[in-house]
Image (cartoon, rainbow, N blue to C red):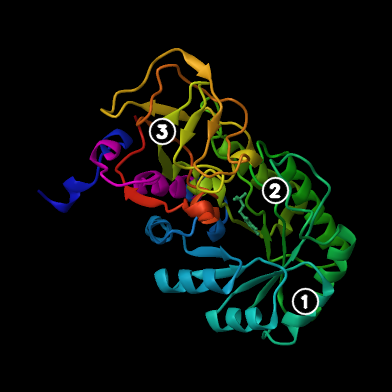
């Protein structure tokens, strides 16, 4: 038997082979590489990856293998991780609030692009970082809706503040850029179009020719079975709006997907610990574990239930209260997911599209949350 043959082909094969205890993340490098190629082929600019969405080593190395050469990092620990795994990668430091020690760490790591959203933070950088060849991207926020949740509340300068800041960046000799993040899980391109037009107005007002425009992350992942995110339509609107708004002076585009890059490459395999007389289902993972985003993002129907022998449960779907393993009553999936009526203790419950913001925010609350990982060839049933 070659090493190859030991990698389970599917989630069912992984479940049947698993002798361990506790929730298991199933990782499919083939899915990750295909998604990376989709961004690289479809997005008309530099594709970077926002490390915070999933910082597993095999995720970073597979992205590098697929051709991703630049990474959005927010902390010295993320810089160290990417430097170790992808030594030649370009690091974009897009967390606009930094301590002095973090600035020093970023300089030592060779960061090539820095985001700023306030005069005070720009002064901190300008006093230390040589301007030649260094990009400073002014982060703008607009009051636009559309995302599952908004990032604008925490970071970003108003268009007026951004105009001043952009002038200061250019005057100090840095390579001027604008960046924004429309918020996570944006279903369509409306928010990007509004931001791109605002960026063009800001650059014009400031009298600065932008070298680059970073359109952030926020690309949608497949939340429900019926969704198939139209990434290419969003890429096309971003490119067309940029051409229309900037004309001949169009800056180079950068994107930094987190969620949409990694969501599909992992599924979460949990087990049913008990089914109560009331019908409530207790799983071995919950909102303090890899299902942390469930209360924020809402219910998903991308769930499959398997009997211990690997056959799909196919009883008529029934609404169920689904609890996680901890003793906290908040530890419950939102709503009442419809699960097969014949679900039973010992069954496997698979959640698809779990590669983003799951493992990275998992806690060890109540002694749970020790996630295991298993590579699989594919995530098809
Ligand atoms: C979190 C983050 C991203 C990734 O966002 P997604 O919604 O996961 O695509 C990109 N850029 C910045 C600056 C971020 O903070």
Q: Residue at x 41, y 33 (%)?
A: 272
Mark linked to residue 228: none
Q: Residues within 10 Å of mark 3 (few under 14, many from 20)?
A: many
Can the viewer see residue 247?
A: yes
Name above or below for residue 183 compared with residue 306. Answer: below
- Residue 221 within the magenta-colored segment of the rendering: no
Q: Nearer the viewer, residue 20 or 112?
A: 20
- Ligand 1 is within 8 Å of the C-beta of the residue at disc 2: yes
Image location of residue 190, percent across then percent down: 73, 39
Q: Disc 2 or 3, which lies upstream in sequence?
A: 2
Q: Secondary structure at mark 1?
A: helix
Query: Which residue does the numbered mark 1 point to in the structure image?
Result: 122
Which residue is the site of mark 2? Answer: 183
Q: Residues in magenta?
A: 14-39
Which x, y percent locates residue 303? 46, 29
Whether the residue carrying mark 1 lies under 8 Å from ligand 1 is answered with no
Q: From the viewer's perspective, is residue 192 above or below residue 124?
A: above
Q: CA distance from mark 2 to mark 1?
A: 23 Å
CA separation in Å, label 2 and label 3:
34 Å
Residue sitting at 36 percent across and 45 percent down?
28
Q: Residues within 10 Å of mark 2 (few under 14, many from 20)?
A: many
* Picture quadrant of residue 87: bottom left
Residue 17 shown in magenta: yes
Q: Locate the C terminus by quadrant.
A: top left
**Residue at x-position 70% and y-position 57%:** 250
């Amino acid at each position: 038997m070659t090493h190859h043959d030991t990698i389970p082909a599917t989630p069912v094969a992984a479940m049947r082979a698993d002798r361990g205890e506790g929730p298991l993340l199933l990782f499919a490098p083939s899915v990750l590489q295909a998604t990376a190629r989709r961004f690289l082929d479809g997005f008309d600019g530099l594709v970077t990856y926002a490390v915070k969405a999933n910082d597993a080593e095999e995720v970073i190395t597979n992205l590098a293998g697929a051709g991703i050469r630049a990474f959005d990092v927010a902390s010295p620990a993320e810089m160290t991780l990417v430097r170790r795994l992808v030594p030649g990668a370009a690091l974009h430091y897009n967390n606009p609030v930094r301590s002095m020690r973090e600035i020093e760490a970023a300089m030592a790591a060779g960061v090539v692009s820095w985001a700023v959203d306030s005069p005070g933070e720009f002064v901190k950088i300008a006093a230390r970082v040589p301007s030649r060849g260094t990009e400073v991207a002014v982060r703008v926020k607009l009051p636009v809706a559309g995302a599952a949740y908004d990032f604008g509340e925490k970071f970003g300068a108003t268009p007026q503040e951004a105009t001043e800041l952009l002038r200061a960046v250019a005057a100090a000799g840095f390579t001027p850029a604008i960046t924004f993040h429309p918020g996570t899980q944006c279903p369509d391109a409306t928010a990007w179009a509004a931001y791109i037009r605002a960026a063009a107005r800001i650059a014009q007002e400031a009298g600065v020719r932008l070298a680059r425009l970073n359109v952030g992350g926020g690309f949608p992942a497949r939340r429900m079975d019926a969704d198939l995110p139209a990434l290419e339509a969003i890429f096309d609107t971003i490119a067309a709006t940029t051409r229309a708004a900037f004309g001949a002076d169009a800056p180079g585009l950068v994107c930094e997907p987190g969620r949409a890059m990694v969501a599909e490459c992992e599924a979460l395999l949990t087990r049913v610990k008990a089914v109560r007389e009331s019908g409530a289902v207790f799983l071995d993972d919950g909102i303090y574990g890899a299902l942390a985003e469930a209360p924020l993002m809402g219910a998903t129907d991308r769930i499959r239930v398997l009997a211990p022998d690997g056959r799909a449960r196919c009883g008529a779907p029934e609404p169920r209260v689904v609890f996680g393993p901890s003793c906290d009553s908040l530890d419950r999936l939102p709503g009442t997911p419809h699960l097969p009526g014949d679900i039973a203790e010992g069954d496997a419950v698979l959640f698809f599209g779990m590669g983003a913001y799951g493992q990275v925010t998992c806690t060890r609350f109540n002694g749970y949350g020790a996630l295991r990982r298993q590579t699989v060839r594919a995530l098809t049933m």
